[in-house]
Image (cartoon, helix red, strand yellow):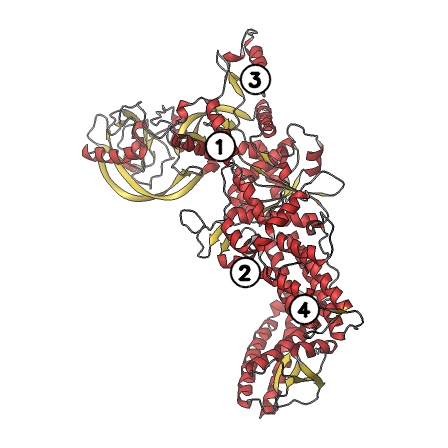
Amino acid sequence: MKIADKYVPQQIESGWYDYWIENRLFHSEPDAREPYTIVIPPPNVTGMLHMGHMLNNTLQDVLVRRARMTGRNACWVPGMDHASIATEAKVVAKLRAEGIEKSSLTREEFLRHAWEWKEQYGGMILRQLRKLGASCDWERTVFTMDDARTQSVIKVFCDLYEKGKIYRGVRMVNWDPAAQTALSDEEVVFRETHGKLYYLRYRVEGSDRQVIVATTRPETILGDTALCVNPDDERYAWLPQDARVVVPLVGRTIPVIRDRYVDIAFGTGALKVTPAHDVNDYMLGEKYGLPSIDVFNDDGTVNDRVGLYAGQERFEVRERIEKDLDAAGLLEKTEPYTNNVGYSERTGVAIEPKLSMQWFLRMEELAEPATRAVMEDTIRFFPEKYKNTYRHWMENIKDWCISRQLWWGQRIPAWHLPSGGFVVAETPAEALEKARAKTGDETLRLEELRQDEDVLDTWFSSWLWPISVFDGIRRPDNEEIRYYYPTNDLVTAPDIIFFWVARMIMAGYEYRGEKPFSNVYFTGLVRDKLGRKMSKQLGNSPDPLDLIAQYGADGMRVAMLLSATAGNDVMFDEALCEQGRNFGNKIWNAYRLVGGWEVDENLAQSENNRLSVEWFRHRMDEVLARVESDFDSYRISEAFMALYKLFWDDFSGWLLELVKPAYRAPIDRPTFDAVRGFFDALLRALHPFMPFLTEELWQDLAPRKAGESIMVQPMPRPGEADRALLARFDLAREAISAVRNIRKQRNLPQRENLRLEVIADENYPAEYEPVIRKMANLEAVERVAQKDASAAGFIVKTTQYFVPLAGMIDAEAERRKLADELTYYEGFLASVMKKLANERFVQSAPAKVVENERAKRADAEARIAAIREQLAALG
């Protein structure tokens, strides 16, 4: 035995990871085997490992490692997302710290800084994933802005434009004043925000009367172009049809329009209409031909179009305008008000609805096959509850704003012509050719064309991910895309179901004519033990690398698996990491125990050992079958728990105790080989969950050649478990536990031999008497016909057992114990009888369920009769 005396995960983990890398055990190439493919949800190039990544990547690694061991050619493709908004913000902040403003740089100069930042700081998270044991094919690492991916994105943009699915136009968009770019609807997070409702006085032109308007955004009165009331609102019947009102402070008169869109019950029933700064107002503006006055600069300050508050920040203006309105007698009142406000998912600032020239992708046609794929289970969601969320969004889908006003990203391949209009092309040379054809001017030069300044939304590159990682856009018939696509499983969080999952499905059907993956496993959010979402702000999110350093990667992985079920939030407690490390310690010590046994080649196998080995073989077959079923249903946490209990309870707690030789005594060869065989199978079954520990012990279990690894050994397959045999053994285990309880209750030492008497019936596991004798430390087991009133008795199913205690029994205590048992079983029998007396239940329930209830009744009746007899014997 070469392994250390103590389990110290930090001493073994880095060495085995290096070994796997050196022997290219993670690498995959197309071959004759069935492929198994996962593409990593590409973390932001700016990202650092957090608890959500730990959960997600542990689950992916479990699936990939298991696939390898079931004979499939497993390929886990890693990569990074360029994260346009987040990365540009990081680079801008870095430059500012160096005294450089982005505005002072050309686009090319800024991009040089951005690429330098990416090379220096980007991809840290991928390096950190190695500490976790992630078995990614690192040779395949890709980046959403590398040459191949960029060319793929540009090719898709041009193709969709030619198909009429991409268009350019002025639309109301979500504007992020911090990043100074448009956002898609999915990048806006709505949060309950406490503010005020401001009641403003709009004087009716040519009159002393006023209309009171309630608004949450008084600063937008600068852009008001109408006031709207409901034509059915009797409160405003006095207003002339051609009435105009004066905008407070601004002094501009605007028309009063009537539309049933206005909610009579909200506020005063009068609505200020600001088409440039509210989506619904924009629709009213289009309907009634109202002008749009955009009063904000891109950075959220007020522009000089109106002349008031120019250059001031929008929220500062809100405070200032309240005072000015009040001073001018134009503020009726204010009251506290809570409403949902949209915030940028990336920068956290309140978004500003804004009219802007943007590029859009029509989504309705793309959504149809993608909706069917999920609703008809061509692509399965785990848990299924997310199907309805998906369907609702897909059936109400809006066109996707795909342009961003940034420099970091794939630049939109559109070139604007000197005389107006534009052409879309994959390369500048092609753009020039198209421009000449469109204008009829053969003398046109490339320098006269101006490429669009915008870049594409980050998600426009990552929606191609399962295809583009195998270069399936540029080379749609290459060997790798044909072999690895569609991928098998996607593990992701439900918060990007629309950002990414739905869009990848759309891209898959548009560019491959089939699904991009077969199954989507949605993880939950990682929360602390109090149920709070983990965040840096709350200070309740531990650094995963610190936990790995303290408990080992295997301990950390076990912690995530113990707390994770598909789609449910993970209640994480650091104590789970300790439990994970303790489980590793249990395996380690069990291995050392077995390794320390001396084998006597001439020693015959005892009946106890033969029975024990036979039982565990069937027990392991039963659990392995359950594990396969759990994996088929993506119950990954449950699969691990089944193996955890198999090792801790059945293997270590029972089998090793059953066959363990006496102190300094040898063990027979058949039992020893069987136990080592079980150990080998258990290590292989546990390897996907605990890769480092299992590799260390498996390498020590037998001589291995250079480059050999447990990770490419076959996963143990279940045989047919004998359920009747297992049930009989469970009866023996229950009897053993009962004898142990008697020892505990009476403070009898384990080494003191006892005798067991039994009134045998069909539920007495006579074949396991050798097991009962050894594990209960009995000098004999005797069949008797009469009850022993002086013995401590117990019942297993319908079999009565007695442990003679030769005067040591407390008759009164025994009577109390039996009386409590009698009360319990009489109550239990009453509940069963009530169910069986219900004719509806007996007639409508499955026959197996009814039969099970009848068996419960028979068992309870037998126990009650036996307890009454024991009470009678005690007098």
* Labels 1 and 4: the sequence-earlier one: 1
Residue at 58% from the left image edge and 32% from the top image edge: 365
Mark 2 and mark 3: Cα distance apart in space: 60 Å
Q: Residue furthest right?
A: 602
Rendered-image quadrant of the C terminus:
bottom right
Residue that badge 3 annotates:
428
Residue that badge 4 annotates:
656
* Labels 4 and 2: the sequence-earlier one: 2
Numbered label tally:
4
| Residue closer to the observer: 424 or 37 | 37
* Labels 2 and 3: the sequence-earlier one: 3
Secondary element under disc 1, as helix, strand or loop, is: helix
The 10 Å Cα crowd at callout 2, few under 14, some 14 to 19, many 20 or more, is some
Residue that badge 1 annotates:
117
The kind of residue tagged 3 is: Pro
Q: Position of residue 527 (x, y in %)?
A: 47, 52
Tags 1 and 4 touching, CB below 8 Å: no
Q: Is residue 180 left or right of residue 161?
A: left
| Residue closer to the observer: 824 or 480 | 480
Tell me where residue 369 sits by quadrant: top right
Q: Nearer the viewer, mark 1 or mark 2?
A: 1
Residue that badge 2 annotates:
579
* Labels 1 and 3: the sequence-earlier one: 1
Q: Is residue 108 visible?
A: yes
* Labels 1 and 2: the sequence-earlier one: 1
The kind of residue tagged 1 is: Trp
Question: Compared to 593, does 717 lie above or below?
Answer: above
The kind of residue tagged 4 is: Leu
Mark 4 and mark 3: Cα distance apart in space: 73 Å
The kind of residue tagged 2 is: Gln
| Residue closer to the observer: 452 or 29 | 29
Q: Position of residue 165 (x, y in %)?
A: 56, 26
